Image (cartoon, grey):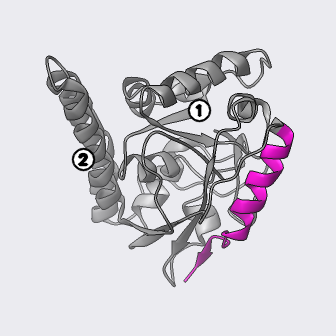
Amino acid sequence: MTALPGTVPAVDPARGSLGSRIRFALVPLWTAAWYLAWFALGRGPGGPARRSWVVRTWANGLLRILRIRVTARGPRPVPPFLLVSNHLSYLDVIRRASRVDTVFVAKREVRRWPLFGSAASAIGCIFIDRETPRDARRAGEAMRDAFQAGNGVVLFAEGTSSDGAGVLQLRSALLEWPAGENLPVHTAALSYHTRSGDPPASHALCWWGDMTFLPHLAGVCRLGWSEARVTFGAATVSATDRKDLARTARSAIFSDFTPSSTT
């Protein structure tokens, strides 16, 4: 989840109301507690089902702490599936994990994020070195294995996060596997919306440019209730050429896309 170049304002985590500082402190505490529960409840028969419940409970609780409501439209895919989406923020992962068992594809640097990196590793995130082209084959095989195991696989194929004003070109390297098997691919368009009087969603919720993680998270904690909207494509897309699949998937995402905004 590499950010686009640019300079954006940072938020001092020490500033803000008492409530925002409490929410900021609750995020790592909540994550650490459920990270331990993931290990404790994942042992023995029924462990995978309990771990899935832990992940959904963690993600839903985190959305409540951050005061983000999720609005979903369109037919939700049922595992196993491959879903291609635009990418706006680390919040995309939390939002998706709150709804269904999902395996994500993320850049390898996510592993080093405080707490969130450990959580991503624990839930089976597929990490890819985007600076090494040949690593796409390994990641593609991992995606196929996850799909064949009955999981939903979510790919943020833009390869970078943006300010939510549009949909970037999709990178086709990780679409070699679904194109080779002419696999039906689901699409989803994401956007974020803040309430009137709060900073614009393009800076307050989207994560891009020179934003650093903790100051941005502090800014999220200072917001009132905001909204994450996801629109699932009405139909799947497919193509036998990965570049054609990338173009077709982007067109489907763009047709359902609304820019992030203040409402």
At 57% from the left edge and 51% from the top edge, which residue is drawn? Answer: 89
125 is higher (above) or lower (below) than 257 = above
The residue carrying mark 1 is 106
Return the x and y of residue 96 as percentages of the image width and height: 44, 50
Return the x and y of residue 152 as percentages of the image width and height: 47, 39
Q: Magenta stretch?
A: 243-263
Q: Main secondary structure of the magenta part?
A: helix
Q: Amino acid at mark 1?
A: Ala
Q: Residues within 10 Å of mark 1 (few under 14, many from 20)?
A: many
| Picture quadrant of residue 193 | bottom right
The residue carrying mark 2 is 57
Whichever of callouts 2 and 1 sits on the residue coming sooner in the sequence is 2
Judged left or right of residue 181, residue 224 is left
Secondary structure at numbered mark 2? helix
Q: Was residue 250 drawn as part of the magenta stretch in this picture?
A: yes
Judged left or right of residue 206, residue 69 is left
Judged left or right of residue 255, residue 27 is left
Q: Which mark is residue 198?
A: none
Q: In the rendered view of the protein, which quadrant contains the N terminus? A: top right
5 is higher (above) or lower (below) than 198 = above
Residue 237 in view of the camera: yes
167 is higher (above) or lower (below) than 6 = below
Q: Are marks 2 and 1 in contact (CB under 8 Å)?
A: no
Q: Amino acid at mark 2?
A: Thr
Secondary structure at numbered mark 1? strand
Q: Was residue 207 drawn as part of the magenta stretch in this picture?
A: no
Q: CA distance from mark 2 to mark 1?
A: 21 Å
Q: In the rendered view of the protein, which quadrant contains the C terminus? A: bottom right
Residue 29 in view of the camera: no
| Picture quadrant of residue 256 | bottom right
At 30% from the left edge and 39% from the top edge, which residue is drawn? Answer: 55
At 53% from the left edge and 46% from the top edge, which residue is drawn? Answer: 90
